[in-house]
Structure formats: structure tokens, C-alpha cells
Image (cartoon, rainbow, N blue to C red):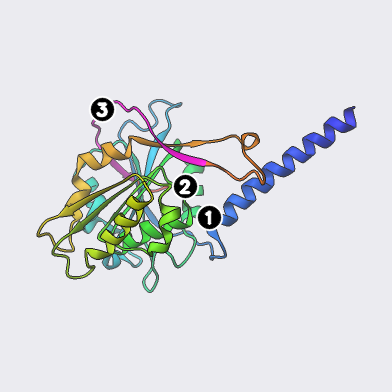
Amino acid sequence: MKNLKKHIYSCLIFLISLSFSSQKAEASGSQKKVKYNYLLHLPEDYGKDPNKKWPVIFYLHGRHASGKHLESLECYGLPYYLLKGKKIDFIVVSPQCPWNKNWSSEDWFNPVYDEVAGKLQVDDSRIYLMGMSMGGFGTWALANRMPDRFAAISPMCGGADVKWADNLSKTPTWVFHGTADNEIPISRSEVMVKALEKLKAEVKYTRLKNQGHDISKQFNNNDLYSWLLEHSIKKELFWHETLPFMKSVVAKRVEVTPPFRSQPRLAMLP
């Protein structure tokens, strides 16, 4: 009997390990793993409650902020507003994409997330993704590659392959695009919105009349952050799932209290 119990226990450990390995492989595919440098924003009250876990936003910049100088991320977008005193109750991770690459070139997400989650009080069920221009394309692409990872996403003035709609339909999405965008046609967003609507996905679409490519003011939109916090993901225990014990994650709405207002601070992990 003891040997049987030991054998069952060993099998369970093996299956758990197999599940985690499969999840990791599915998320990263055959991409090269690399850790990009990033800016980190912590809410002022971070750490006051040792048991509190915080939602996390991954912000993806556009092409012009690529390179090796992190300060260029603060010229526009979410890092700019945080620098100017924008108050949101999220940990914000703003990685920097190298020149001659895009957000789909390498598996940068897993190494960066692993480092952040290993050192900070992260709520793994409330990980969000947003970006503009190249970052908008990257938001679509990463959510397609990792359809069970993000509680909600917000791609701005980007585009995607309509064939990704099935994967993307699993993640609540709020799309923004300007009608006067001369760099990325608004049709790139609209075709994705229509494909998701056809699949009965949860998708919002804000068509910004007479606005061009630079719609970075939307990162100062408090309604966007309130909407993100309405979403979380539910993770099923592996023994509740069918073989091969792959992680099952479903986005759901959650009740939230009005966010408190705190002074943001930027930090770098040691």
C-alpha cells in the first residue's frame, strides 16, 4: 500500500511538472529567451500591507522609443504620465525593445515577468497588456501567443492577423484608433474588432474622430484603468481539467472598489 501511494504521488508530481513545462513551451514557442531592460512603477502604498498583491500592467512602447536608453520611454505614453504624477494603483512594467526588433521577435515576456513576480507582490490573476503603434501590434501578437496569460488587453492604433481571432477572443479587449491616422489605417483595428464581435468576444472599440496616429492621451484615461480592474482570470486546479492537464484560464468580471489615489514612484529591481 505504501508503495502504491508513493507511486501515485510520483505520478502526480510528474504530471504537474509536465503541465508547467507545456504551459511554458506553449507561451514561448521556439523563440529565443532574452530579458529586456525596463522601467518599473510602484504605487506609493506598495509594501505597506505585506499580504496585498498588486495588479500589473505591461506597457509596450512604439518604434521611436526603441533602443538602449530607458529615459526615452518617458517621452510619451504611460511612462510619461506616471513621471508627471499620474496616479494608478498598478505595478507598471515598461520594457524597452531593441532597435531592429519588434515585440514579436523574441520571448522577452517570460524572463521579465519571472523576475518581477519573483521579487514583487504580484497578483498573477490580474496581469494586463497595453501598447500604442508598434506596441499596439505587439499587444495583439503577445495576447495571441499567450491567450491564457492576460486578464485584459488594450491595443491602440495597431493591427493583427484576423486569423488570430479565435485565440484573441479569450481575452477582454478595448481597442483605440484615430480616424485620421495616416500611419496605421484605422481599418487594421476595425477588421479585428469585427472578427472578435463575430465570435461574441468581449471587445470595446473607441473610434477617435479626427485624431491621428498619436493617441497617447488615452494613457491618461482613468476609465481605461477602471475597466482593466473589472477583469481577472480564473485558474482551474489541474485535477479539475481534462488531459493533458493544461492550464485553463477564463477571463471574468470582478467587483472592484474605487481605486485609491497614491503618488507613483519609479524604481528598478536590483
Distance between mark 2 and mark 1 Cα atoms = 9 Å
Question: Which image quadrant for residue 134?
Answer: bottom left
Q: Amino acid at mark 1?
A: Ala
Q: CA distance from mark 3 to mark 1?
A: 33 Å
Q: Which residues are magenta?
A: 249-266
Measuring 78% from the left and 34% from the top, which residue is drawn there?
Answer: 9
Residue 80 vs residue 254, the one in the foreground: 254
* Marks 2 and 1 close (CB-CB < 8 Å): yes
The x, y position of residue 233, in whole percent, is 45, 38
Under circle 2, the secondary element is loop
The residue depicted at 64 percent of the width and 46 percent of the height is 19
Q: Which residue is mark 2?
A: 149
Q: Which of the two labelled residues, at mark 3 and mark 1, occupies the earlier sequence position?
A: 1
Q: Residue at x 37, y 58 (%)?
A: 140
Element type where label 1 sits in the image: helix
Residue 16 in the image: x percent, y percent? Answer: 68, 42
Please rate how many residues cluster around mark 1, counting C-alpha atoms within 10 Å: few if below 14, some from 14 to 19, many from 20: many
Count of picture labels:
3
Check disc 2 and give the amino acid type.
Arg
Query: Who comes first in sequence, dot 2 or dot 1?
Result: 1
Badge 3 local density, few (<14 within 10 Å), some, or many (20+)? few
Horizontal relation, residue 245 to residue 32: left or right: right
Give the residue type at disc 3.
Pro
Q: CA distance from mark 3 to mark 2?
A: 25 Å
Q: Let me know if residue 207 is in the magenta part.
A: no
By secondary structure, the bulk of the magenta-drawn segment is best described as: loop
Asked if disc 3 and disc 2 are in contact, CB closer than 8 Å, the reply is no
Reading the image, the residue beneath label 1 is 27
Q: Disc 3 or 2, which lies upstream in sequence? A: 2
Q: Which residue is mark 3?
A: 258
Seen from the viewer's position, the closer of residues 224 and 186 is 186
Please determine whether, in this image, residue 64 is positioned above or below residue 166. Answer: below
